[in-house]
């Protein structure tokens, strides 16, 4: 994730809010009016938002409108994407029906809030779209197709494929508002990953802090992709959700510096919000039998491990085991005894340094 800018941050709009605005403008044109520009929609928690239109098109029995997503100062992969809503009249009494156009994915696995086969337009955005249409005309009977040009390529930078969403992006957002650097989308993806694993009745999942440790732990345990949770720095959020939605076994995997922070009790592993305590690391080095001068000279936890491995491999192995064991104790304290837990600590090349637990 890009570095957080200094100073006040500008909020943005979710893909769901953009889709609702585009759908309202297209519906107004479909029922015989003009495209409202800017177009306003009600927000789920009160208030309204206005959007300029980037696309206005009428067709034979249809109307299309598009809104360019502005994510504010959030490093959102969909910032600048064009969200298009095409509306056609539906059969009498059919209500609002949703379709996935180009660049919007389709759900293929159970466990998500939408059934397999449904377009990946989440329940929150569906409700926003329906509310926006109802302000134009009550009880609309329309088919709403949402598309995002280039969405299939953007989706490769998200966790959609792992969640069984194929063909493009998801239309997301419960409030309509993007709060910069709230990481809500990442945390939601962690939760949906656990949901998908549970729906498939998987008995063992692995949560990793990064791609190297994820690939290594997958090889280590022979896990399917749907058992892998891209936890990143959000170990606390992952454990909190897993405590309420348990699976029989969890392997937590990561590198030395991240797991050293977890071993100290930190549940947010981002470098801006937690750091390895030098005094604690020095005590670990002493217990492991490492040369005393190493801790004083090393600029980082990772560099400390590298220097110990170079001059005292047995001490490095003892240090890694100490951190893995303490990290496991922290995780078990969060989860209780109902979930079997093991911790795997890897180096930057994916070599296993220590394993704690069954």
Image (spheres, rainbow, N blue to C red):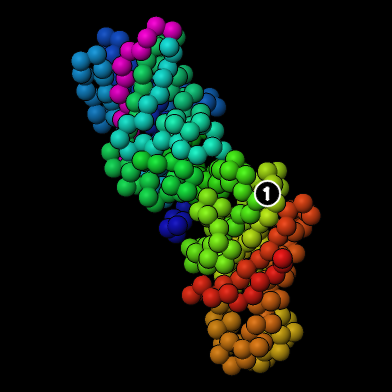
**Looking at the image, which residue is at 51% across and 31% down?**
114
Residue 321 seen in the current view? yes
Q: Secondary structure under badge 1? A: loop
Residue located farthest toward the right when viewing the structure as drawn: 337
The percent position of residue 330, horizontal first and vertical second, equals: 73, 62
Q: Check the image and report above or below for 228 versus 44.
A: below
User: Which residue is at a point 37% across and 50% down the rendered structure image?
Assistant: 156
Determine if the magenta segment contains residue 74: no
Q: Determine whether 261 is above or below 55 in the image.
A: below
Circle 1 residue: 247
Q: Is residue 282 left or right of residue 233?
A: right
- Depth check, front residue: 222 or 316: 222
Residue 272 makes an appearance in the image: no
Image coordinates for residue 320, horizontal then vertical, percent:
65, 77
Image position of 22 with respect to 236: above or below: above
Q: Pick out the residue farthest to the top.
A: 92
Q: Which residues are magenta?
A: 80-93
**What residue is shown at x 36% (from left), y 18% (from top)?**
143
Depth order, front residue of 345/267:
345
Number of disc labels: 1
> Percent position (x, y) of residue 58?
21, 19
């Amino acid at each position: 994730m890009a570095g957080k800018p200094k100073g006040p941050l500008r909020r943005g709009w979710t893909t769901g809010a953009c889709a609702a605005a585009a759908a309202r403008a297209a519906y107004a044109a479909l029922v015989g009016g003009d495209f409202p520009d800017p177009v306003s929609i009600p927000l789920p928690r009160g208030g309204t938002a206005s959007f300029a239109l980037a696309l206005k098109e009428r067709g034979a029995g249809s109307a299309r409108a598009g809104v360019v997503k502005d994510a504010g100062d959030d490093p959102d992969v969909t910032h600048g994407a064009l969200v298009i809503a095409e509306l056609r009249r539906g059969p009498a009494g059919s209500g609002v029906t949703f379709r996935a156009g180009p660049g919007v994915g389709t759900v293929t696995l159970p466990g998500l809030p939408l059934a397999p086969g449904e377009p990946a337009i989440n329940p929150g955005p569906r409700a926003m779209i329906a509310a926006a249409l109802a302000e134009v005309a009550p009880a609309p009977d329309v088919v709403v197709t949402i598309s995002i040009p280039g969405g299939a390529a953007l989706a490769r930078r998200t966790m959609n494929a792992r969640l069984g969403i194929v063909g493009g992006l998801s239309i997301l957002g419960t409030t309509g508002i993007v709060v910069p650097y709230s990481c809500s989308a990442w945390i939601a993806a962690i939760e949906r990953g656990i949901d998908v694993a549970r729906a498939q009745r998987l008995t063992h999942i692995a949560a990793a802090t990064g791609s190297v440790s994820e690939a290594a732990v997958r090889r280590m345990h022979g896990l399917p992709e749907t058992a892998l949770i891209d936890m990143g720095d959000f170990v606390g959020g992952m454990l909190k959700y897993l405590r309420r939605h348990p699976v029989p076994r969890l392997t937590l995997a990561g590198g030395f510096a991240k797991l050293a922070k977890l071993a100290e009790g930190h549940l947010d592993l981002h470098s801006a919000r937690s750091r390895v305590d030098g005094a604690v690391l020095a005590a670990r080095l002493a217990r492991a039998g490492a040369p005393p001068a190493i801790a004083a000279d090393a600029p980082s936890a990772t560099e400390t491990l590298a220097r110990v491995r170079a001059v005292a491999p047995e001490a490095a192995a003892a240090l890694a085991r100490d951190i893995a064991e303490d990290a496991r104790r922290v995780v078990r304290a969060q989860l209780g005894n109902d979930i079997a837990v093991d911790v795997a600590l890897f180096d930057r090349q994916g070599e296993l340094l220590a394993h704690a637990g069954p």
